[in-house]
Image (cartoon, grey):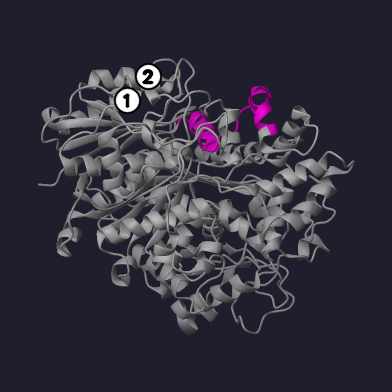
Amino acid sequence: MAAATRDKFDRPIVAVTGIGVVTSLGVGKSDNWTKLSGGVSGIKRISRFPTEGLRTNIAGAVNEVYRQDMSPAELSERVALLAGEEAIAEAQIGGKGRFPGPLYLAPPPLEIEWADRIAMTEMAAANADTTYPDLMRVARDYAARHGAFRFAIIGEHLAEHFGTEGSPISLNTACASGASAIQLGVEAIRRGDCQVALAIGADASLTPESLVRFSLLSALSTQNDPPERASKPFSKNRDGFVLAEGAAALVLEDLDHARARGARVLGILEGVGEKSDSFHRTRSSPDGKPIVATIRNALADAGVAPEEIDYINAHGTSTPENDKMEHLGVSTVFGEAIRGIPISSNKSMIGHTLTAAGAVEAVFTLLTLQHQRVPPTINHAVPDPAIPLDVVPNAARDAKLHRAMSNSFGFGGQNVCLVMALEPA
Amino acid sequence: MSGRREVWITGVGLITCLGEGLEANWSHLQRGGPPLYDDKSFAPYIVHPLPPVNFDRQIPKKSDQRQMELWQRIGVYTAGLALNDAGIAGKPELLDGTDMIVAAAGGERDIPADTGILTGMRKVAERGPFLNERLMSDLRPTLFLAQLPNLLAGNIAIVHGVVGSSRTFLGEEAAGVDAVRIAQARIAAGQSELTLVGGAYHATRWDVLLVFEQSGAALTGAFAPVWDRGPHGGFAPGNMGAFLVLESREHAQGRGARAHARLLPVVSDRNKRQPGEIEATLRRQWESIAPHVDRAHAGIISGAAGLQPTTAAERTALKDFGLPVRNTGTYIGHGLEVQFPANLAIACAALEHGRMFAPAGTGDSGASPSRMSQVVVTSVGNWRGEGLGLVERVT
């Protein structure tokens, strides 16, 4: 038997052998990649609920998957399942309902929804003001008809459906969650706890309240017309992100395990870096140090130098704050060389898929390496002179790419950076 | 393979209705006597209150306190207790590399805003626009930050400067077990030297009770010990915060830190909860840790919450383990994500005293071992997830 293949730090090498994705652009890699590399936007006017009275009435919704009256939990589970099935089918691993490794899931935070509260209020038929004790009175009857609320329901259902091993982990690191799910899988394989892991990020929680919450923090774009032009990362006239839905799944596998079973290796997860920011609940430290440390930690974990990065998949939310800080971060790490590295934001087309974003964009980064073609940052009509980056404006570009980085930054000082590469010869 | 390096618990922070700190909790559990519960404020539901806490002692800035809801204040406060206890509070050279795994639920609702909207909703024809308009005017921007599950970790980073890394696990009891499991495994494998792990639970609120009334899990009626709550049972949500500082032995010894206990690899799993499955999972988990257990000097701290059939199934399984059993839920209530870290904290107190505390209810069995040096901590989730942890005295 051949000696185990190890990375520079004598750890098992983590390969990606299957990927799946669902966004507002469509279901599956093929549809998504065609549109993403074609510069097509998935942002549309919201049709799922009335938007009168809201400042923002656009989103990147997964309309192709949504069915009438699906709750955010149901829809998030559905897109996670579709992405997971695509990834597992590609990896050709395990048997039906028998995935040979653990599940690391980044779901949206769940709670009882307004639709439920309103329905319980009607059941309670209180005379005067509605109170929580009124809801309590009917809660069990309501649950008997509609199912009880469960915090961990998505992970439980996915674990059951895919037959993953052990206790499924649901995690949240805000807008870095999808990347953290991948990181947990990478760490588990490196520890030798498992040889295969399924990492999924899923978020389909477009509701009036989710829009309002981000609106009240002035995080969303209000340039509603036309919807497809609203998300314009790194542009001078950017004014916020566009809330979006999506899911992505990656089958992570010890490279030796993948090779032994003759699996096709889509890429290598070479390194993961993280660093928390203690500056503010929603803003980055103005000196950019946590972002810089995150990127440097990822490069160090991968054992590569900045000049070995050929492409950066930006967090690029299109908020004034993020894009400025991301520019500061990458230009600090890469120095003058950053002017020669393409850095583009998928969010210009799919919006911000929140807890799914880190996984969705990792999948897109792998597709970028696979196709040797960099997807564009669309809507780049008014460049920001303070951000002199090669954002691959408006049109995709062929390029020779071996290694790429994907950034994820979130509220609460969450920062994660992934380094991915094509399989070594 | 986890377990290559020893993992020590070098810091503990604990708040339950019994008080703040290990000694306050230990002395009440040891003394026995009437549990502290509140069956009036949320009648007919029974909850365990929060003891008086001077948040200023760990969260000096009022501006920080204003940005948090109570679950976050409890958590940031308790995390501060653990960091102090470990001797790393206020030491940026250590905190800069300290990792963090927090187990959390969703955040808190604004009850008056919710009920105001629901009341108004009944009088309008166009509900969608009404909901939008009222949400825009009634929701406080800062409330969102209290609703994001990862903002307990975020606030700990801001207030205490723990900035190595930050991850938040979701999903009731299993999230607490897996948070400790992953934290232990990372240190054992050399992926971390120092990790703060734990969580906080604000139980005395209607939005929490609504969730558990839906699933029929919330205790109503007369209070009884967790083992003795009748055929349906129920748990009494408890306000609590629990954090542990886990550290590699090498790192702890290098800085002269003292160990409360050694934490062995934690085991966790799930099943579909068909009859007999809880018992089977616990037995399988027990078999995996039993070779490390010194039966003459070991006891079990059960996380049983009082809900059925889970509590009865756990009781059946524990009988086969043949160790003395004590539960904490009768006294501290049930803190979901926080229960497992809280019980590990109490296990540290028991190890320091070398014995078990007083029994409470018919499922607590066996005399305390003399010179107790090991404690097995159990977790059986109210809906899903089973886990075991083993802590032992460092000699």
Q: Amino acid at mark 1?
A: Leu
Q: Element at badge 1?
A: helix
Per the image, the residue denoted by label 1 is: B282
Where's residue A16, x and y in %? Answer: 44, 49
Q: Main SS type for the magenta part?
A: helix
Q: Is residue B347 visible?
A: yes
Answer with left or right where residue B92 lies relative to residue A219: left
Q: Residues within 10 Å of mark 1 (few under 14, many from 20)?
A: many
The numbered mark, 2 or 1, whose residue comes first in the sequence reads: 1
Per the image, the residue denoted by label 2 is: B313
Q: Amino acid at mark 2?
A: Ala
The span picked out in magenta is A134-163
Where's residue B389, x and y in %? Answer: 28, 37
Q: Chain of mark 2?
A: B
A28 or B231, which is in the foreground? B231
Mark 2 vs 1: CB contact within 8 A: yes
